[in-house]
Image (cartoon, rainbow, N blue to C red):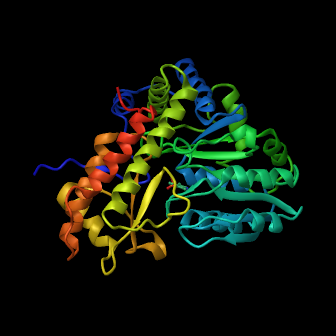
Amino acid sequence: MLRKNRLFTPGPTPILPAAQTAMASFAMHHRTADFRALFSRVLSDLKQFIGTNNDVLVLTASGTGAMEGAVSNLISPGDKVLVLSAGKFGERWRDLAKAFGCEVEVISGPYGETFSLDEIRRKLTPEIRAVYVQATESSTGARHDVEGIAKVVRASGDDTLLVVDAITGLGTTHLNVDGWGIDVIIGGSQKALMIPPGLAYCAISERAWRRMETAKSPRYYFDFRKERKAAAKGESAFTPATSMFAALSTALDFVRQMGDGDMVAGREALVNNAELAAAMTRAGAQALGLKLFSPSSPSAALTAIKAPAGVNSGAIVKEFRESFAAVVANGQGEMKGKLFRIAHIGYYDYLDTIGILAALEQVLASVTATLVEYGAGVRGAQQVYAKSITQKSQPVGAR
Ligand SMILES: *Cc1c(COP(=O)(O)O)cnc(C)c1O
């Protein structure tokens, strides 16, 4: 059959068609009144999307650029920091903190699991200058308890900052950024905001801005104070990815439309959409006899599914691509070959979700020796969907 190329990866994710059109025809210079108006509108919409009153910055970089800035701007060499790590992205925090000369304490959970709040409480001594964590760990599909972690960190006082990589958490998880006291929260354009890679964004608390007055690590491109000053005038310190701002503005309009003109309602609808797609996918995979990689704390961002015994997940990924031009993600690092990952971040609807599960049945039939009961995975997902309709939590989608 004809095959349409489709991304089911936890970044980049499918692009909103209207955002693609907006980028394609964009030709504004970044030091003009028109661009300053666009830039300021995007920052103000992003504040609502994140759900914060803190200042928001947009950086021309992939998500990791903002992660690096959240280390270099906040710590001085020799500072003690605590990294909560249960996957490849947690390990990125550890490596970044080491690269900037931090004394790094790590609480590590097994891949696929999350952390004990008691252990965090025990390790959180007054000398810890910052705690770094993911909202959702995209390498394992696990969700971490950001609210619980924030409670522990805030109880330890104002000298410890909480930095959350919510690059796949924003738009897939309900997060109360200011209420919980998150000091830096980070997102990326190629995830829930449905546009290509190229922009990272973050919201920064007053506590964190104060820390920057004394932090001594070297920084230049990712100097947050310089960006804040420029942003107040509707500009970026350097040349921003201008056409990406056009795309971002269109994507934020789309989210607002999902909430019938209300950005907060739109964001909640986007999160609920991911939650439902994830619940359908978990039910479908389990109905096919597959095991989830993160069963105890699954995220709505993506579902990591274990390859059946004796099957390398690379063969599953390859078969999805070759037969259906569907791109799902293999495991990363030590998890490569053991699991595959299907994303629910951003622009996915009912048909995408049902379609990938139907394809999964075909893929399993080709790569395993066992008999596949066609329709079992799809049925499992449909039952979850049907239940969500009767519960009146109407799924949302493109108009
Ligand atoms: C995608 C992602 C990142 C950022 O990766 P980049 O390639 O730098 O955009 C960071 N953390 C998580 C949890 C992610 O999913």
Which residue is nearer to you in this view: 210 or 179? 179
Give residue 92's quadrant in the image: bottom right
Classify 44 as above or below 70: above
Which residue is nearer to you in this view: 374 or 62? 374
From this viewpoint, which residue is outermost toward the bottom? 310
Coordinates of residue 137 in the picture (x, y in percent)? 55, 59
Coordinates of residue 306 in the picture (x, y in percent)? 39, 70
- Residue drawn at the location 76% of the way across and 40% of the way down: 205
Which residue is nearer to you in this view: 283 or 142? 283
- Residue drawn at the location 88% of the way across and 51% of the way down: 157
Give residue 19's quadrant in the image: top left
- Residue drawn at the location 68% of the way across and 64% of the way down: 84
The image shows a total of numbered marks equal to: 0
Coordinates of residue 34 in the picture (x, y in percent)? 53, 18
Classify 53 as above or below 32: below
Query: Does residue 12 appear anywhere in the picture?
Result: no
Query: Does residue 152 appear anywhere in the picture?
Result: yes
Coordinates of residue 388 in the picture (x, y in percent)? 42, 39
Classify 298 as above or below 226: below
- Residue drawn at the location 24% of the way across and 49% of the way down: 5
Q: Quadrant of the C terminus?
A: top left
